[in-house]
Each structure stands twice: as structure tokens, then as C-alpha cells.
Amino acid sequence: MGRIFVVDLEGRTYKCKFCKTHLALADNLVSRTFQSRRGKAYLFSNAMMLSGMHTVADIYCCCCGQIVGWKYEAAHVKSQKYKEGKFVLERGRIMDGLDSEFYIDTRPSMSDAEDA
């Protein structure tokens, strides 16, 4: 697959809770009112991650490989088209660049259990 180069983003960032890798800039935050299967989540217009029928793709921290959210690949309902190409980061899997942590869900997800 090649080498992964980690980039430190300039400005206020959201980081991977597990390894502190920068994932997204606060300036790219679109909405704080998303709900995920693990709880509250944020919608971003851009994020630094690797990339389902709802046409979404899980997104992973490029450094530690933990699932941190998903990307909307395609929306099939006209009213949801604004989500296409945007990223959702789950609050329990990220931390604010100011080092204040959000609610942390310590229960393993299916992908976490598979890694154990």
C-alpha cells in the first residue's frame, strides 16, 4: 500500500482519541448534531483519514487504524444530498485539539473486538 505520512494540521484540530493523530480542522466542522451507532458525532466537510448500503464508507485513523467515523459516499434521498462527500467523526472516538476529551464510550465495537 505504500508509506503513510502523518501531517500535523495548523490551527484548532480534532484528534484520534487513541493515538492523538490530527484528523480534522475545527474550521471544517459543518454540524455538531449528528448521531452515530455509538452516540453523538460531528459532520465535517473535510478530514484526514483513510477510507456499508446507505452508501457510506468507514473511515480509519491513518496512524493507528481505529475506526473513527464514516464518509458519505452517496445519498439516495434528494433531501440528504448535502451529506455527499462529507465526513462524520464520532465524538467518543476523537478529542478536541485543546486536549479536552468528550464522552468516551469504553465498550468495544465490533471492529475493536475483532482486533483483540
Image: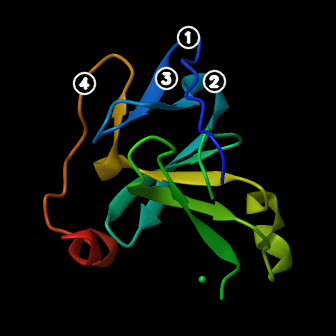
- What percent of the width, then of the height, locates residue 110? 29, 78
Q: Earlier in the sequence, mark 1 or mark 4?
A: 1
Q: Are marks 3 and 1 in contact (CB under 8 Å)?
A: yes
**Which residue was labeled with disc 3?**
13
Marks 2 and 3, Cα distance to the nearest angstrom?
8 Å
Q: Are marks 1 and 2 in contact (CB under 8 Å)?
A: yes
Q: Are marks 3 and 4 in contact (CB under 8 Å)?
A: no
Residue extending furthest toward the right? 78
The amino acid type found where label 3 is placed reads Thr
**Which residue was labeled with disc 2?**
27
The amino acid type found where label 1 is placed reads Gly
**Which residue was labeled with disc 4?**
100
Q: Are marks 2 and 3 in contact (CB under 8 Å)?
A: no
Say what secondary structure mark 4 lies in.
loop
- What percent of the width, then of the height, locates residue 43? 58, 49
**Which residue was labeled with disc 1?**
11
Given residues 115 and 53, the one toward you in this image is 115
Question: For residue 56, which numbered disc appears in the image?
Answer: none
